[in-house]
Amino acid sequence: MKDDNKTKMQLISELTELRAQNAALEKSITGHISAELVAEESSRYAESIVETVRESLLVLNAEMKIISANRNFYRIFNVTPGETIGSFIYDLGNKQWDIPKLRELLEETLPKEEAFDDLEVTRNFQDIGYKIMLLNARQVYRQDIGAKLILLAIEDITERKQVEEELQQEQLFSKSIINSLPNIFFLYNYPECKLVGWNKRHETELGYTADELKDRHVMDFHAPENNELIMTAIKTVMEIGHGSVEDVLVTKDGRQIPYLSYAVRFESKGKSYLLGICEDITERKQVETRLMGAMADLERSNKDLEQFAYVASHDLQEPLRMVSSYTQLLAKHYDGRLDEKAKKFMDYAVDGAVRMQILINDLLTYSRIGTRGTPLETTDTHALLGEAIRNLAAMIEEKRAIITNDNLPTVRADASQLMQVFQNLISNAIKFQGEKVPRIHVSAQEKVSEWVFSIRDNGIGIDRQYGDRVFVIFQRLHTRQDYPGTGIGLALCKRIVERHGGRIWFESKPGMGSKFFFSITKSAKEV
C-alpha cells in the first residue's frame, strides 16, 4: 500500500510539473496549434488523471490554504468547492483537521524532508461519521508560478481496518482455542517438514521456548531410529489426506513420552501443510503393560492349573481303581453272609467309587482341552453332527428323540472337540425333557465375521437367573436322582468354544424349551 501511494504521488507530481512545462511545449509545437491550445489540452489531460484516482487529493500552497481538490474529496467529505477552495486545511469542516501531528508534519517535517508517508488518522467527523484516514504528502515546485506547493492524498481505510480487526479477532479466537487444547498441536510445511505453527502445550510438554521451536524439523522431536517410521507416516498423510502413527516424542532434556499422532493434509495459497495433534498415551501404555503382565500371569496360572488337574486326576486313578476293585471283591466274597444293612453300605461304597471315577475322568477331559486338542483345520460341521448323533444312538432310541437340522457350514475347528460340543448339547436336550417326546433342531446362521450355531429343544427350560451358573464346572441345577450326570457338560462346551475364539449362551423359559447358541469365527484362531 505504501509503495502504491508513493507511485500515485509521484504521478501527481509529474503532472504538476507537466503544467509548469506548458511554456516549453509551446515552443516545440509548430503548425496550426496555438500555445493556448497546447496548454489547455495538457491541463485537461492532467485533470483527467487526477480525477481517476480513488484517493481524495488536495493541493495546498505555502500558507496551508487549499487551492485545488478532486471530485473524490468533495464526494467523500460531503463539501462543496466553495467551502473548500481558499480555506485553511486546519479550518476545513469546523477545524476537524486541526491534528497536532498533521500540523507538525506539514509545517516542520515536510519542508525539510519534501515528503511524508502513511500518517494514520482516526476521527469522528461531524457529517460523515467515524473514519480512519491514511495521509501522504509531497512538496513540489511550480516553475510557472515560482512557488512550492503541497500535494496531500487522503485514503479512507476505515473498511479495510475493520476487516483487518475482524480477522485479527478471529485469529486471536482460533489461537485461544488451539492453546486451550489438552494435546500438542502442530503445523508443518511440506515437503520441508519444518514447524510453522504450534500451541502452548507444545512448548510446555517438550520444554522448548517459542523461538526455539520455530522452523525446527519434525525429526528434532523424534528418536533418530524412528526416522523411517515418521517420514513414511507423513508421506501417507500427504497422499491420502489423513493418517496416524504411534511413537515417542523426545523432549528437550531427552525424555521420551509415548504419543499417538493424528494428522491431515492442509492446503493454503498453493502450499501444502501437515496439521494435527499428538495425544499423550503414557497412561494407556502403562495399563497395557500391566494388562500384558496380568495376562501372562493368568496364562501361567492356567497352565499350572491344567497341569495340576491332569496330574491330580491321573494320580488318583490308580488308588481309586484299587478301592473300587476291592470293594467289589468284598461284596462278591461275602455275598449271602452280610445282612441287608451291610450290603447296603457296600453298595454305597461301590457307587461312590464309580461316581468318583467318572468325575476324575471328566476333570481329566476338562484339563486336556487346551493342551491335548488338535490344531484347527477345515471341518465339515454337518459330518460332525452325524457323528455325534451316532454316538448318542442308544439314548436317542430309548427316548424316541426326533433330531432335525438345516444345512451346516464348513469352519476351522478342532473336529473332535467341536463334535463333543454337539454331543453334549444334544444329550442335555434329550435328558432334560420331561414327559414330552424330545424334538431337537440344529441350525447355523452366517454373520459378517462368524457362524452362529443353535440347538433348539422342547424340554423343561432353564430359569434365566441361572444363566451364568450352568456353564460353571460341576454346577448342577437338579439332583442326581432326577437327572444323572456330573454337571461338567456345559462347562466343557464353554471351554471348547472359547478355545475357538467364540462364545456360548442360551435363551430359555421354564417349561417352554431352550435354545443354546455358540459361535465360531470365520477366521478362527486358537485362543
Image: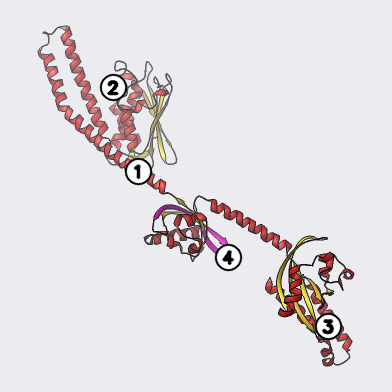
Q: CA distance from mark 3 to mark 4?
A: 46 Å
Quarter of the image where one finds residue 143: bottom right
Residue 267 is covered by the magenta coloring: yes
Instruction: Identify residue for label 4.
Output: 270
Can residue 65 be seen in the rendering of this structure? yes
Q: CA distance from mark 2 to mark 4?
A: 78 Å
- Direction left: furthest residue: 333
Residue type of the residue flagged with mark 2: Gly
Identify the element where label 4 is drawn.
loop
Quarter of the image where one finds residue 157: bottom right
**Image position of 498 (left or right of 353):** right
Quarter of the image where one finds residue 403: top left
Q: Position of residue 472 (x, y in %)?
A: 33, 28
Dot 3 or dot 4, earlier in sequence: 3
**Image position of 426 (left or right of 175):** left
Q: CA distance from mark 1 to mark 2?
A: 41 Å
In the image, the segment drawn in magenta is 251-274
Dot 3 or dot 1, earlier in sequence: 3
- Direction top: furthest residue: 339
Query: Can you say whether 210 is above or below 523 in the image?
Result: below
Any mark on residue 485, and which?
2
Instruction: Identify residue for label 1.
Output: 290
